[in-house]
Image (cartoon, rainbow, N blue to C red):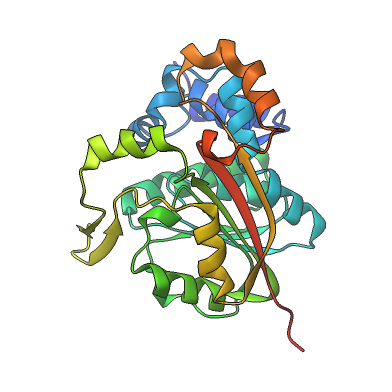
Amino acid sequence: MTTSSDLLEAAAAAFSKCATIDGFLDVWLRNAFLPPREQAILEHYYASFVRGFPPRLRRLYRSQTREILGLIAAMDRPKVLEIGAGCGTESLWFALSGAEVTGIDVRADRLDVARARRDLLQTALRVPLRAEFRHENLFDLTAGSYDIVWMEHTFHHLEPRLRVVDHVARLVRPGGYVVVSEVNAWNLPMQLQYLRRRGLRTIDTYVDATGRTHVYGVERFLSPRTLERLFGRAEIRTVSLRYFRLFPNHPLFSALAPIERVAERLPLPPVFTSYNWVGCKAASR
């Protein structure tokens, strides 16, 4: 019978060896470290990765955080906001990398998982993690509070879009960054896939566990140029734009990973399913 001390010892041994975010997630996928409820939510959230997390998918997952981890490494304890934190993987890795992180989400159950994971890490590794998870509305957050705002496959859910952009711009301090990892609207197969799934309705409402109603974008994808234009009007200027990923998250595409890596060096925006955009807010004069 496994005791709590055995579990903590196993967690400490596994997490102390993690050098990359994909390795960090892989430890969670391979081990049942959480209480049954939180473990079930985590496994459902990462269902496609639980079925298989081969080297290609690990590389792509790692690639999504390349820009933001570079920014965190270049700053001294930056304050990071993750909008749409889900079960907290990125937020927790950012905290382990030296950031002070706030993660928000409309799903209280997923935030429970994020907190349980944080508490386990702090106990197992015996280090305090500056990571808090709030069931809070984006528009209730205080302006000028963050060095970096991070959104990973979240922006296409946020509405009303223009108000979201303006408020995100206010949340970032002068000289701070907005980092967005998104689905590429220029990719026709992706658009057709989601059109079949959701139909023509791209805006809906969502009632959370507290009874609060949220306006919700239903996979309302946008091109990087549209993203640049939206944030540009809020004085967030483009620093970098990078395309990646040719194929869906399925182990069958692992054999095509070398083609995918070569293609990422080519200027062919419509063929990629994903992109990372980094914008910087002008410094105060």
Is 33 drawn above or below residue 101 in the view shown?
above
* Left or right for 98, reference 179: right
* Residue displayed at 50% across by 42% down: 117
Is 197 drawn above or below residue 250 in the view shown?
below
Residues 195 and 206: in front is 195
* Residue displayed at 56% across by 50% down: 91
Task: Give residue 58's position: percent from left, percent from top.
Answer: 60, 26
Residues 137 and 65: in front is 65
* Residue displayed at 69% across by 31% down: 18
* Left or right for 54, reference 159: right
Query: Given the current orientation, which residue lies at the most extreme bottom position?
Result: 285
Quadrant in the rendering for residue 93: top right
Quadrant in the rendering for residue 214: bottom left
Task: Give residue 274's position: percent from left, percent from top.
Answer: 53, 40
Quadrant in the rendering for residue 175: bottom right
Is 273 drawn above or below residue 207 in the view shown?
above
* Residue 210 visible to an observer of this rendering: yes
* Residue displayed at 60% across by 79% down: 144
* Residue 132 visible to an observer of this rendering: no
Task: Give residue 51's position: percent from left, percent from top.
Answer: 42, 18
Image quarter hosting the C terminus: bottom right
Task: Give residue 47's position: percent from left, percent from top.
Answer: 38, 27
Residues 205 and 235: in front is 235
Image quarter hosting the N terminus: top left
Residues 151 and 120: in front is 151
Is 60 drawn above or below residue 162 in the view shown?
above
